[in-house]
């Protein structure tokens, strides 16, 4: 550290350091007075005696002098220290909407929060992240990059980069920037704005960062996390563009996430390239987590794609963390039309195996949800048969957003997950916990 730079004019630190020094001087004099009183019979030269008499206010009574010096020293030292702290932190707190003490307390509290990994994509994942960010700063979102529609699809086709739309939504959900920045990330150019029509500003920023980083998509997302001061970390499932394929129950093959989302009777899905490598950050986060949350989101087009990356699937099977599947509160027209809870669980198990998750969390407030042929109907709570092999345990809670009854309420969902984690303990911090695939 270059101490001389702190003494430059304009920083506003030197004067308050001086005040704090005067306070320390007062405290030192109070101590000297006490010591002098203890050794008042000792011989002191006349000039020194005069200086001590003046500095220690010997024209006052002893206890009055001690009290004055002590109070003055404490006041000057405390006030000077307070102003030094204000001068140092002022540039960082001028735009804060809460008092500094509350800001520091919240940051330190969140830093001690559980290590949570959320896997998926679409609206469901960003909804979950908005709830979790109020409880922990140790969040990693592992995001699907298989989208091929809209702005993401156009950028993917023109620039050859992985899908960025779900990543943008997660960055906006976790960013600790001004609200205007979140609005900027989500702004989508209209049809009247030429060749940019349909593109979201956040998608273009990620594409630009990818170009700046020489085509290293994972590094580009790391930079976006830092630029946006993300609370936690947003990670792509892979830095490689992925294509989602599906087989329907009648044997028909469908290619592309946007097409599969509108298709009924999906039997299975898979990725190309099949041997794609996962993001290193994603695998490391899963292995170090206390809680891994799969979903919520579109089962075949948002939740399963990142889990079909071989290294992520293996990491999920091996992690000692508690693994929870958060089922949607409503079905979706197309891919999960007519699905109940058992259908969602069986779809997940069919692709990942019977020990993919430990607990399934489902909404039991079916009265709030409003049936809608376009938006879906409440997911009925039929559970797999009792004899189902090694099925996960079921947890029920009120998770629906009253203002948007086809989606989760972010705070209710996050609070329910953390209650489950508290009830189950921290398996990620207990030695000797292992998984078998």
Image: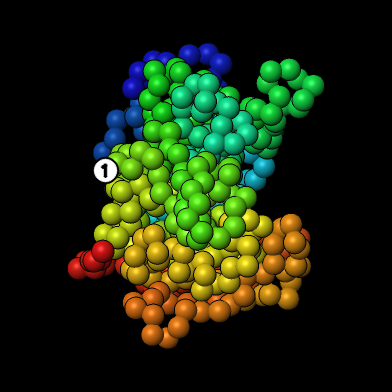
Disc 1 is placed on an element classified as loop
The answer to whether residue 367 is visible is yes
Corner quadrant of residue 334: bottom right
Q: Position of residue 189 (x, y in %)?
A: 72, 26
Q: Which residue is mark 1?
A: 42
Q: Is residue 216 left or right of residue 80?
A: left
Work out whether 98 lies above or below 248. above
Residue density around tag 1, few if under 14, some if 14–19, many if 20 or more, within 10 Å: few
Foreground residue among 330 and 12: 330
Q: Nearer the viewer, residue 378 or 20?
A: 378
Image quadrant holding the C terminus, namely bottom left
Q: Is residue 324 above or below residue 110?
A: below
Residue 291 placed where, x, y %?
Answer: 40, 61
Residue at 33% across, 68% down: 355
Q: Is residue 7 left or right of residue 203?
A: left
- Using the rendered view, name the quadrant where residue 353 is placed: bottom left
Relative placement, left or right, of 7 versus 179 is left
Name which residue lies at 38% across and 76% down: 391
Closer-to-camera residue (242/80) = 242
In the picture as drawn, the residue positioned furthest to the bottom comes out as 386
Tell me if residue 75 can be seen: no
Task: Looking at this view, name the residue that lies furthest to the right.
Answer: 192
């Amino acid at each position: 550290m270059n101490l001389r730079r702190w003494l430059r004019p304009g920083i506003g630190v030197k004067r308050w350091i001086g005040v704090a020094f005067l306070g320390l001087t007062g405290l030192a004099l109070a101590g000297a007075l006490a010591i002098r009183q203890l050794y008042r019979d000792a011989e002191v030269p006349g000039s020194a005696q005069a200086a001590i008499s003046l500095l220690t206010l010997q024209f006052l009574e002893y206890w009055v002098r001690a009290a004055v010096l002590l109070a003055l020293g404490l006041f000057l030292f405390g006030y000077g220290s307070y102003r030094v702290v204000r001068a140092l932190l002022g540039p960082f707190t001028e735009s804060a909407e809460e008092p500094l003490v509350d800001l520091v307390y919240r940051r330190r509290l969140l830093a001690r929060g559980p290590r949570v990994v959320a896997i998926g994509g679409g609206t469901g994942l960003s909804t979950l992240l908005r709830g979790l960010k109020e409880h922990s700063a140790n969040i990693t979102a592992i995001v699907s990059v298989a989208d091929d529609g809209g702005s993401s699809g156009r950028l993917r086709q023109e620039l050859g980069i992985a899908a960025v739309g779900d990543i943008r939504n997660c960055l906006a959900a976790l960013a600790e920037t001004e609200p205007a920045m979140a609005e900027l990330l989500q702004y989508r150019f209209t049809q009247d704005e030429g060749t940019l029509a349909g593109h979201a500003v956040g998608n273009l920023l990620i594409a630009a960062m990818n170009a700046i980083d020489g085509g290293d998509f994972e590094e580009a997302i790391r930079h976006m996390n830092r630029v946006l001061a993300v609370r936690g970390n947003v990670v792509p499932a892979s830095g490689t563009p992925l294509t989602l394929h599906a087989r329907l129950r009648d044997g028909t093959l469908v290619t592309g996430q946007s097409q599969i989302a509108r298709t009924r009777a999906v039997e299975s899905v898979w990725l190309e390239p099949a041997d794609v490598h996962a993001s290193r950050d994603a695998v490391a986060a899963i292995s170090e987590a206390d809680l891994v949350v799969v979903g919520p989101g579109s089962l075949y087009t948002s939740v399963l794609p990142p889990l079909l990356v071989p290294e992520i699937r293996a990491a999920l099977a091996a992690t000692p963390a508690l693994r929870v599947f958060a089922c949607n509160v409503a079905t979706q027209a197309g891919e999960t039309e007519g699905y109940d809870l058992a259908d969602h669980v069986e779809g997940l198990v069919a692709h990942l195996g019977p020990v993919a998750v430990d607990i399934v969390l489902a909404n039991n407030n079916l009265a709030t949800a409003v049936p809608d042929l376009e938006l879906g109907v409440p997911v009925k709570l039929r559970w797999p048969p009792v004899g189902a092999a090694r099925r996960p345990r079921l947890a029920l809670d009120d998770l629906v957003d009253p203002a948007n009854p086809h989606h989760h309420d972010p705070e209710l969902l996050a609070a329910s997950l953390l209650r489950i984690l508290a009830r189950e303990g921290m398996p990620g911090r207990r030695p000797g916990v292992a998984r078998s695939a």
